[in-house]
Image: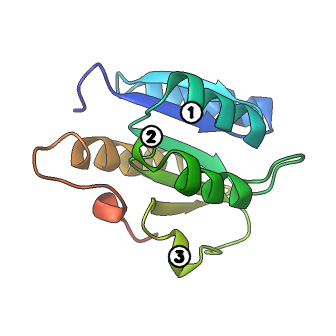
Amino acid sequence: MPPESARVLIVDDEPALRALVSKVVERLEAGVSLAADGSEALRMLADEGPFDVILLDLMMPRVNGFTVLNEFKKKAPEGVRCVIVMSAIGRPIRASDSDVVCAVVEKPFDLERLQAVVADCLTAHNEPNRGHGNDCNREP
């Protein structure tokens, strides 16, 4: 079980999905912050970061998830410990993103699997001597 101080940012443009994922993460006793799009996520990372895990939708209006990944890496790499991509387009992650992307969870996703992936990432990044990036990688 992750420590209560664990912080998770959920980034998705669909309000119902944000609420559902939030309930799943709250079961892990982690603090949850919500962003409705990529620009809000970048602002929250700058103002409130770092986060232990970021659950990131790729296909969003205004600022999409691919742009968010690039900005995370350029502007605040220390604020990004683990990103779990939530996507309906399969495994679209480039090798250059693999240093921050821990897992890809395809939509529609199984809620138990999503919870297990988040728990693994929270645990991996709260253990001593564990680094950033894909320490918590789980194959779908």
How far across and how far down the image is residue 84, in percent? 50, 53
| Type of amino acid at the residue the image marks with label 1 | Leu
Looking at the image, which is closer to me, 93 or 16?
93
Label 3 sits on a secondary structure element that is helix
Disc 2 crowd rating (10 Å Cα; few below 14, some 14-19, many 20+) is some
Could you tell me if the residues under marks 1 and 2 are in contact, i.e. CB atoms within 8 Å?
Answer: yes
Q: On the rendered structure, is 95 left or right of 11? A: left
Which of marks 2 and 1 precedes in the sequence? 1
Which of marks 3 and 2 precedes in the sequence? 2
> Which residue shows up at 57% across the image and 23% down it?
47
Looking at the image, which is closer to me, 33 or 108?
33
**What residue did someone put label 3 on?**
96
**What residue did someone put label 2 on?**
79
**What residue did someone put label 1 on?**
45
Looking at the image, which is closer to me, 29 or 84?
84
Determine the image quadrant of residue 87: bottom right
| Type of amino acid at the residue the image marks with label 2 | Gly
